[in-house]
Amino acid sequence: MREAGQSRFDRRAGRYLLLYPEMGLELSRTATEIARLCTGEWTVDGIAQHLAQIHSEISPVEIMRDVRDFLKTLACRGLLQGFK
Amino acid sequence: MNNEYRPYTLIAELTYRCPLRCPYCSNPLGYAGHGNEIDTDTWLRVFHEAEALGVVQLNLTGGEPLLRDDLEQLIERASRLELYTNLITSGIPLTFERLSRFAALGLNCVQVSVQSSRSTESDRIAGAPSFHRKLEVMQWVASLELPLTLNVVLHRDNIGEIAELIALAERVSADRLELANAQYLGWALKNRVALLPTREQIETARTIAADARERLRGTMEVIFVTPDYYSVHPKSCMDGWGRRFIVVNPEGLALPCHLAHTLPGLRFDNVTKRHLADIWHHSDGFNQFRGDGWLPDACRSCDRHTKDFGGCRCQAFHVTGNAGATDPACSLSPDHGFIESARSQASQSAGVPILFEYRNGRGFAQ
C-alpha cells in the first residue's frame, strides 16, 4: 500500500501536510504516523501492529480503527494505491 | 501571522505565449507576446519568498510553460523548497526525454488538457494540430508514474461528449478528471454566445459525471465544475480574494487572480520591485476585497458571504462595470438579469453553429 501524495512539515502550523494535485490535508499526529508508513512496504495490519507497539497506552482495537478510518479516507479520494 | 490570509498556492504564469489558440483561453485579451517576461533569477527568488510566506503548492502554468527553456531550473528549485509542483500544460512542445528530466528533478504531477475526445474537433478548438501528441504525452506521464490530471474545458460544442471524455480519461489512466465549464471571462466572455451551453446540456453532463464519480471512486477523482451562469450562488472565486492564492503573471505582477490586473482602478505591485510578503500583506490591490468591509450591504447581511466571499470580482466588473458590486451570478444580484438573458440566448441558439474568435497571437512567432 503506497500513499500517492507527498508529505512535508509545515513550519507555520507545526504539523505535517499531505499534498496532492490541487489539494492538501493537514495531518493530526496520529495521521502523520500512519501516512509515514504508507511506503508500499507495509500492510494495513502491519501498520496497526507497529503503532500498537509504540503506543501501548492505546488499545490495539482503537488503533486498528484509526488506521482503517484514515486509510479509507485517503483511498476514497483516490490518494492511496493498493488499499482494499 | 494571521492565518486567515496565508497563501497556500502560488500560480506561476511563466509566459502568455502558447502554441494553441483556444477561444476560451483564461489569459487576458491582448497579451500574447513575451517582451517583458521576468527572468529565471526573479522566478527563483519568488519561489523562495512564496515558500517563506506559507506556500506549499506550485502550479507552473501559462500560456504554455514548456516554452520557457529554464523550466528545468525552476522545477529543480521548487523541489528543493519542497513545493508540491504541478505542471499545467498542453504537452506541446515536449519530448519524453525532457519530461523524464522534469520527473528526475522532482516534478510532482502533470495536468494535460484536451479540447475534445475527438481528434479533429480537439484540433479545431485548439486552433492547431495537437490531439495525438497530447495522448502520447499522457502516456509518458503515466509511464513515469507521475499523477496525471486530465482537464477539459467544457462548452456547448463538447459538453455532449462527457461519456467519451470520461472513457478517454480511463484509457489514459488519469488520476483526476476535471470537467470544468468555461468561466466567462477574458476570451470566453468574448466568445460567450458561441460557448455557453444550455441548461439541459449542463444537467445531462452533470448526471453522467456524477455516475462516473461514484463508479470510479478510489481510482479516479471526477470533478465537474458548473458554469457560474447556471449556479444559484456565486462561486467562492479563488477561495476568496487574497486568502489562499497568489498569481504571479509573466511580467511579474503579483495578483489575487489571473485577471485582477484587468480591473480598473486597482494597483498591483511587481515582484521585481517589492518583496512578495510585503505585497501579500500590505499592498492596496491584495487588501482591496479582503474581509467583508467592502461588500455591498445586501451581501454583508447574507450569511453566504462567509462561504463565497462575495464571488468573482472580475465577473462583477465585466457585467456591471463595478468590481465592487454583487457578483451577478448570484440570483439575488440586481444585475442577475444579464445572466438570465445570456442563458435564454444560449437556449435559443442551441444547435445553431456560431463561429468563435480564436485567441490571437501565435506565441511562437512573436
Image: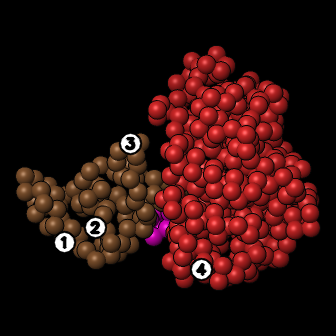
Chain colours: A brown, B red
Residue, disc 3? A13
Residue at mark 2 shares a chain with residue at mark 1: yes
Q: CA distance from mark 2 to mark 4?
A: 27 Å
* Tag 1: amino acid: Gly
Q: Position of residue A13 (x, y in %)?
A: 38, 42
Q: Name the disc covering residue A46, or none.
A: 1
User: On screen, B107 above or below B197?
Assistant: below
Q: CA distance from mark 2 to mark 1?
A: 9 Å
Find residue A14 and report its image quarter.
Answer: top left
- N-terminal of the two: label 1 or label 3? 3
Task: Name the quadrant of the C terminus of chain B.
Answer: bottom right
Question: Alpha-carbon distance for marks 3 and 4?
Answer: 34 Å
Quick check: marks 2 and 1 in contact, CB under 8 Å?
A: yes
Q: Are marks 1 and 4 on the same chain?
A: no
Residue B81 showing in the rendered view: yes
- Name which residue lies at 64% across and 16% down: B297
Q: Nearer the viewer, mark 2 or mark 4?
A: 4
Q: Which residues are magenta?
A: B214-223
At mark 1, the secondary structure is helix
Say which amino acid is labelled 2. Leu
Q: Nearer the viewer, residue B330 or A74?
A: A74
Is tag 3's residue or tag 2's residue first in the polypeptide sequence? Answer: 3
Instruction: Tell which tag, 1 or 4, sits nearer the viewer.
Output: 4
- Residue occupied by mark 4: B100
Alpha carbon separation for disc pair 1 and 4: 34 Å
